Image: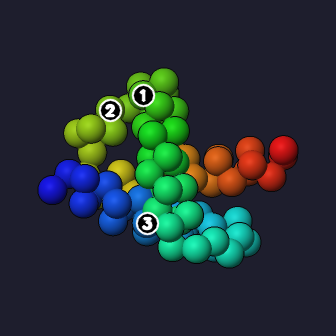
Amino acid sequence: MGFLYSIIIGGVAGYLASRFMGSHNSALINIILGIVGGLVGGFIARRLGNDPDNDGLVMNLLIAFGGAVVLIFLGRLF
């Protein structure tokens, strides 16, 4: 169930981040972007002293969204 949860949260976060940043990606790219963004966002949250493992659905979505935005921004730099 956790894998399915990650795909759903990743897809939503990737979609929102791509729309926020003005990108138009496919559904698969949005899911991958959201999942990797969740990893990046979780790393950043842990470095800031937050424990994303104990947070709820909305906080996990925001962390994945933030990580996906960071990935899109870094991708545009290169």
Q: Residues within 10 Å of mark 2 (few under 14, many from 20)?
A: few
Q: Residues within 10 Å of mark 1 (few under 14, many from 20)?
A: few
Q: What element does badge 3 sit on?
A: helix
Residue 7: x, y in percent? 34, 60
Above or below residue 38? Residue 45 is: above
Residue under pointer 1: 46
User: Going by the picture, which residue comes out furthest to the left?
Assistant: 1
- The residues tagged by marks 3 and 2 sit, at their Cα atoms, a distance apart of 22 Å
- The residues tagged by marks 3 and 1 sit, at their Cα atoms, a distance apart of 22 Å
Tell me, yes or no, whether the two marked residues, 2 and 1, touch with CB atoms within 8 Å: yes
Q: Residue at x 70, y 65 (%)?
A: 21
Q: Residues within 10 Å of mark 3 (few under 14, many from 20)?
A: many
Q: Nearer the viewer, mark 3 or mark 2?
A: 3
Q: Residue at x 84, y 44 (%)?
A: 78
* Disc on the earlier residue, 3 or 2: 3
Above or below residue 28? Residue 36 is: above
Residue under pointer 3: 11
Tell me, yes or no, whether the two marked residues, 3 and 2, touch with CB atoms within 8 Å: no
Q: Nearer the viewer, mark 3 or mark 1?
A: 3
Residue 20: x, y in percent? 65, 69
Residue under pointer 2: 51
Question: Is residue 66 in view?
Answer: no
Q: Is residue 38 left or right of residue 54?
A: right
Q: Residue at x 27, y 45 (%)?
A: 55
Question: Is residue 54 in view?
Answer: yes
The answer to which quarter of the image holds residue 11 is: bottom left
Q: What element does badge 1 sit on?
A: helix
How many numbered circles does the render carry? 3
Which amino acid type is shown beneath numbered disc 3?
Answer: Gly
- The residues tagged by marks 2 and 1 sit, at their Cα atoms, a distance apart of 6 Å
Of residues 73 and 46, the one nearer the viewer is 73
